[in-house]
Image (cartoon, rainbow, N blue to C red):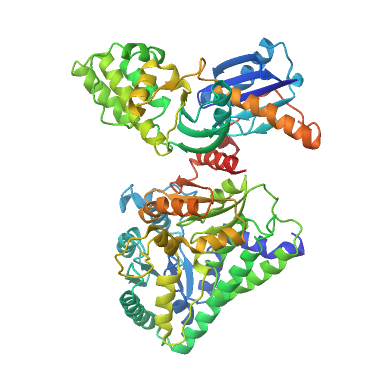
Amino acid sequence: MSEDSRGISRARQIYLNRSKRARELKAEGKKIIGYPCVYVPIEMLTALGLMPYRTCGDIREPVTEADRALPGSFCPIMRNCLDCALKNKNDFLDGMVTIHSSDPQEKTARVWQSYTDHPYFHFIDMPVTTRPEAVQYFTSQLNDFKKTLEEFSGQALTEDRLASAINSHNRQRGLVRQLHELTKPSPPLISGTELVQVVKALMSLPVAEGNDLLIEIIGEAKNRTDGPEKKATRLITWGSTLDSIEIMQLFEANANVVMDESCGGIRAYRAEVESPGDPLQGLANYYLKEITCARTFRQAKPGEARKDYARDLQTRFGYLEGIVREWRADGAIMLLVRYCDPFAFEMPSLKDYFDSIGVPSTYIEYDYTIGALAPLRTRVEAFVETIS
Amino acid sequence: MHFAGVDIGSTMTKVVLIDETDNLLSAIKGPTGPEHRQLANRVMAQALEQASLKIDDVDFIVATGYGRVNVPFADRQLTELSCHARGVFSLFPDARTVIDIGGQDAKCMKIDNGRLIDFVMNDKCAAGTGRFLEVTAAALGIRLEDMGEISMRATTQVQISSLCTVFAQQEVAALLSRGEAMENIIAGIHNALAIRIGALAQRLRIEPRVVVTGGGAKNTGMVQAMKNKLDCDVSVPEEPLITGALGAAVLAREVYSKTAGEHGKPSTGPRRLEQATFFSEERP
């Protein structure tokens, strides 16, 4: 391995063996807390010296154990995620925090609680709108979360500690955005596949270590000569979670993917937590309003009854136009995970939005297994052929 | 000059050879299926033989279809969607919509001057594909190729409620034991399939002329059911199985001429007339 390909290669190693660092830290006495969704305010864990570890599914793992707890026609990612837990792959976790970001998350929470025996468990109730009352309610839920965390860790979650954790995580968000600046050139300096590995690595490391990794990768990518090959087409992807390189490689066989707007990509890093006053309220505001997941109901003006489809589309998807223009994307792939209703319902409107800004788009549905990728490959290639 | 299109579908391999003015030199089809995929190269050899050509006499070869990726004798791969679009355009210059009923997928394409502009495909389930017809023909104990003719004798259409290939088989068995006439059951099957494929096609705005291709287009009862469902006339090429291979051959000529015009004769690399492998085999 050459000196200048260290960070990217290290991210790949972490991606391939995600729990290694958590297990090492666990052996040193650190407490590791799992979370399955980027809506969990992990700053609160970091502030108490607990390490947040995003529990993911494994696309190569056939679901066998989860069948005794969950129905088959159910979010394949949560099924797979729980399956890994039931196969003791998360045996190093000291606790689990789940959140009502979608119904499968909520239903799985209960199963999680009864089928696993982590010493700590907390479920955060999360409202679905961005109304001021919702932010207030969410703040109160974070306050409850704070209490159980304090009890579990035996420490007080002070405003200073929280502010410092928020700073570190904001720094991570800034660095991830800096990293994505490097996909603006053609060819990009870092591939979509590498970005999937980097983001998943970040979700497997303590925040400070993640930030060091990012600094290393940014420095390395800027000067690399072994970057991605230039393809005739530049794409962005949008969806719930794209956390497996197999899917990204499918897209990148025919195009350069310059941005992934999913919670395996830029989504958890696009904005920053602002907390001039109460940090919990700052967190509530950020998580409810700034993470652009289909699970949250967004309106131009909360509670308004006036119908205006174009303005509605602008409110829900307007941020994508900037991404498409700045990253000079030729098209967009909407990636749907089967049975993911929130994203499936969003898709026709998003298609209309992409049409309205003149961006060709297509949708690809998969069931979070690698078994049936060949037909998806044909769809992606045909889409690229229509726009190139 | 000579150009070839090789369409390796899930069930059949089709090869078309043309000259520089798109004259058809040969068109051959043979089985591909998982157990016969090694025949893809034999189909190519037969096509060459029919045209009295050797593999090195062919200036450019485009492979398409499910098995397009690892074809050791092709110079370029393009999806079957672009190839069907181009092939149908050669036969029907006013075609705007193509519906291909293949062995394991059904797809609908919108085309503009032979260029693919939009498409939809069925998901990985077999409902709405040629497999649905194969399975029900087997359940009825008749040959696939006789289904169309038998269905034309139907006096009424039996309602088939399940579009699932597995459950439809059971439903067919139940209908037979209830004494329903074979022709009415088959007409019902064609109708069920047409509803499924029609719904898929209607996600794109259907514009005439509509051309139906693929193995499904060889079934007259199926084509009639599509006409009824779409409520418009549909055209069927004389040989509906080869439009993908034909399109691939025409695109081979176009890619060749374009590249030759811009950068000189495209390099084609060594070609081996050996068996093709499928996607799944390159995966660990």
Measured as percent of width and height from the top left, residue A330 is found at 60, 51
| Residue A265 visible at all | no
Measured as percent of width and height from the top left, residue A71 is found at 31, 49
Measured as percent of width and height from the top left, residue A321 is found at 53, 60
Image quarter of the N terminus of chain A: bottom right
Measured as percent of width and height from the top left, residue B220 is found at 39, 16
Q: Is residue B215 above or below residue A49?
A: above
Q: Is residue B18 above or below residue B107?
A: above
Q: In the rendered image, which quarter is residue B244 located in?
A: top right
| Residue A19 visible at all | yes
Q: Is residue B266 above or below residue A302?
A: above
Residue at the spot 39% in from the left edge and 76% down from the top edge: A284
Q: Is residue B273 above or below residue A362?
A: above
Residue at the spot 35% in from the left edge and 32% down from the top edge: B196
Q: Is residue A184 left or right of residue B232?
A: right
Count of labels in the image:
0
Q: Given the current orientation, which residue lies at the most extreme left position?
A: B178
Residue at the spot 59% in from the left edge and 59% down from the top edge: A325
The one nearer the camera, A67 or B258, is B258
Q: Given the current orientation, which residue lies at the most extreme right position?
A: B264
Image quarter of the C terminus of chain A: top right
The one nearer the camera, A79 or B4, is B4
